[in-house]
Structures are given as C-alpha cells and as structure tokens.
Image (cartoon, coloured by chain):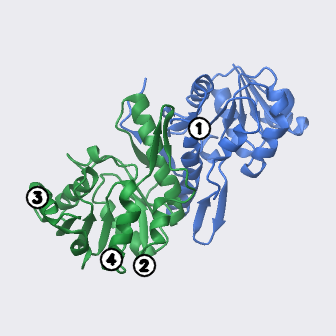
Chain colours: A blue, B green
C-alpha cells in the first residue's frame, strides 16, 4: 500500500507518517510544496518513508492524506486535484477560531471536507480530527478514530490506514456530512485540553466492532 | 437541589429523572404539558420524583432540563420562557435528518441550544447529547458527559447534575458554540450504532479532571 501525506512536513503529517511506517505500511511518501524539505523530514523519520512534491507524492498512491493546516486545505486540494485524479483524499483538517471565551469551530455550516469534495473529482473521506499530533509521536495512541465519507471503498481504505495509526478502533462514523460534527469536535477537544490542562482524545464505548 | 425536567415524560427525560433520583437529588420534578401524565410517570419512577405542568415544574428550580424532542425544543423554550425567568435551561436536543446514506445533523449552522438562547432570558447550557435514553434506565452509564455554555455558573450546575447521571466524568466542553459539534455528535453516534449494531457512547481519554 502506498500512502501519500500531503503537507506531511507539519507535526500532524509527520505523526501520521511515523505511525504508518511503524505499522508496516511499505510505501509512505511525505509530500510538500518543497521536495527537499519533504525528503529531509522523511530522512529524519527513516524506514520506508520518502519525500516528494505533493504532485509526485500522490501519483500511484492508494490514498492521500491532506495534512496541511486548515487554512491551506482548500487551496492545496485545488492545487493537487489534477495529479490526484480519483485517488481517495483523506481530509483531517478542522477550522477553529480562538476567542477569550474558548475555541469555536468554523461558523460555516458545511465541513471543510465537504467543501474539498466540491474541488476534486476524487472521493473525499474525513477523520482523525480528535487525534492530536503530539499523541502520535511516541506510540499509537489509546484512542479511537472516527472516519466518515460517502464513498464506501474510499472510506474502507481510510478506516484501514486509521486502524494502523491508533491503538483503539477505527470506526465508520457515517456519511461525509458527519465531518461537520467531527471537525467541530476538535474545538471541543481543544477546550477540554485548555480547561483541564489535558491531552484529550476520544474513545467510543459500547461498540463491539469486527 | 431542585431539578425540573421539561417534557420529562419521554424516554430521555424519564432516564434523567431515574438517574437523578437514584443519585440522591432531593427534588426532581417531571414537567409536561399534561400534569396528570407527568404525575403518572413520576409515580412509576417513585422516590423523590414528582410531576407537574412544565410551568409549575420550573418555578423554584435550580436548573431545568429541556428534554422534549428536538422538533419541539424551540416551541417549548418559547412557551416556558416566562415561567423560567433566569433559571438555567439545559438543552439536550439534537436535530437529526435520516436518509438512506445515514443520519445527518441539522443543516443549520447554529445549534438548537444557540437558537434557544435567542428565545429565553435564562442562561442556556447544552450537553448529554451522546447519552442514549436506553443507557440511562438500569444504571449510570460508563460514559462521559460533555457540557458547554457561555454562563459559567449555569455550566457548573449542569456539570454537577450531569456527574450524577453518568458513571464517567462530566466535562466542560467550552462555550455554547460547542453545542454545534455536540449536537452533531449525536448523528455520529446513531451512524455508529447502525453500522455496528451497537449502543455507542463517548469517553474522553487523557483528562485527569478534578
């Protein structure tokens, strides 16, 4: 399996690359606008991780994780739409706005993932919103991953790679519209972290999944 | 402490009443448009639970849980605004729309709880969206409760009563705007339940709360 991590030089992308390589994914390519920077980060991680431009990274990939910061997600999706073709795009971004009262999710009614789907031909899936980059570095976090999407094949693939990222379960959270709640949940997690000086994550109880 | 449960004759309201009575809350009043029906349900539950009209239930209450179905939440809030005065109103509703692709949250960008805040003078808090009525009947569920609100005193009270409803933690999830994610999370839970034939709930990892 080849997994491209677009914008993979940031802390979340690096964390995903580290976990996938540790879980034995045999081809993990960090993408960046700057190929040299991508290669440098890949060399730091080591193992089967390589680096390339975003466009080169997605070619031949089974799935591409869009790991750029939220404010760059739409532009990057638009930029790589051509190279992506029909390779499933895995959106992990959540837009947050910070104020003195706490963190709020984006006031837009539609999720970033839904807006990305307007820009690319590829099926878009979304997930991993509740996993903090800091929780990915050392070991697979004892958290569950919630994944949503309208394309069943793409969603199954995203669930498969997510199950290698977390120590808990990777669960199907429904249609792409669930991304509104999942992206918003990042604001909830950030508020909980601030309130309790915590590194919060989510586990889903009561599910005996396959 | 006196807790009013408006629309408390439904399964969620009953579950909340059962749990609060079991946890030793000394005055739990089930409210309904039909006082006799409220009294009948209260008698079934027994203990310190009584029944009254919604208006009578909120008078002198420390907090009122708005436990009507989502499609009645705004109308009921409008109806009881006068009797409520400044008694904190605890919104637990989530609007869902069902389709063949799965359950979606309400397309409105603003949460039901935020729209309720427009209708009442009382401070509105929101939470318990991930707790299923069916999980409240037998024992306090092994789940956490996420509570949000802009009024700190009202939120503290809602957290206090929620901590008596769940066996897990009742956590401060930030400002009332967090209700968008929390209400949407109900759709996620319903989709997970459908997909895995489960009775899912949420636990937050990594928090060592007071």
Residue B63 in percent (x, y) is at 31, 72
Chain for mark 4? B
Disc 2 to disc 1, how far (Cα)? 36 Å
Q: Looking at the image, can residue B206 be seen?
A: no
Question: Quick check: B64 left or right of B155?
Answer: left
Q: Earlier in the sequence, mark 2 or mark 3?
A: 3
Residue pointed to by mark 1: A176
Disc 4 to disc 2, how far (Cα)? 8 Å
Question: Quick check: A96 left or right of B105?
Answer: right
Secondary structure beneath dot 4 equals helix
* Residue drawn at (74%, 33%) of the image: A5
Q: Decide: few, some or many residues near mark 3? Use Cα within 10 Å; few <14, some 14-19, many ≥20.
A: some
* Residue drawn at (55%, 62%) of the image: A194
Residue A191 in percent (x, y) is at 55, 60
Q: Which corner quadrant of the image does residue B8 belong to? A: bottom left
Residue pointed to by mark 4: B84
Residue pointed to by mark 3: B40
Q: Which corner quadrant of the image does residue A193 belong to? A: bottom right
Marks 4 and 3 on same chain:
yes
Marks 3 and 1 on same chain:
no
Chain for mark 3? B
Residue pointed to by mark 2: B121
Disc 3 to disc 1, how far (Cα)? 43 Å
Q: Are marks 4 and 2 in contact (CB under 8 Å)?
A: yes
Q: Are marks 4 and 3 in contact (CB under 8 Å)?
A: no
Q: Earlier in the sequence, mark 4 or mark 3?
A: 3
Given residues B58 and B198, the one toward you in this image is: B58
Q: Are marks 2 and 3 in contact (CB under 8 Å)?
A: no
Circle number at residue A47: none
* Residue drawn at (46%, 74%) of the image: B151
């Amino acid at each position: 399996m080849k997994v491209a991590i677009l914008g993979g030089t940031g802390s979340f992308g690096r964390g995903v690359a580290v976990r996938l390589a540790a879980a034995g994914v045999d081809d993990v390519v960090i993408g960046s606008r700057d190929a040299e920077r991508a290669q440098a980060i890949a060399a730091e991680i080591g193992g089967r991780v390589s680096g390339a431009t975003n466009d080169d990274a997605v070619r031949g990939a089974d799935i591409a994780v869009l790991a750029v910061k939220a404010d760059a997600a739409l532009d990057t999706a638009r930029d790589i739409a051509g190279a992506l073709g029909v390779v499933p795009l895995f959106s992990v971004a959540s837009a947050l706005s910070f104020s003195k009262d706490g963190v709020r999710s984006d006031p837009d009614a539609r999720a970033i993932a839904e807006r990305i789907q307007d820009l690319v031909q590829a099926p878009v899936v979304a997930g991993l919103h509740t996993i903090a980059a800091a929780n990915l570095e050392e070991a697979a976090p004892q958290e569950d991953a919630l994944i949503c999407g309208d394309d069943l094949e793409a969603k199954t693939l995203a669930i498969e790679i997510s199950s290698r990222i977390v120590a808990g379960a990777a669960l199907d959270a429904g249609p792409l519209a669930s991304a509104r709640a999942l992206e918003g949940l990042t604001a909830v997690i950030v508020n909980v972290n601030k309130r309790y000086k915590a590194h919060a994550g989510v586990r889903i109880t009561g599910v005996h999944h396959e």
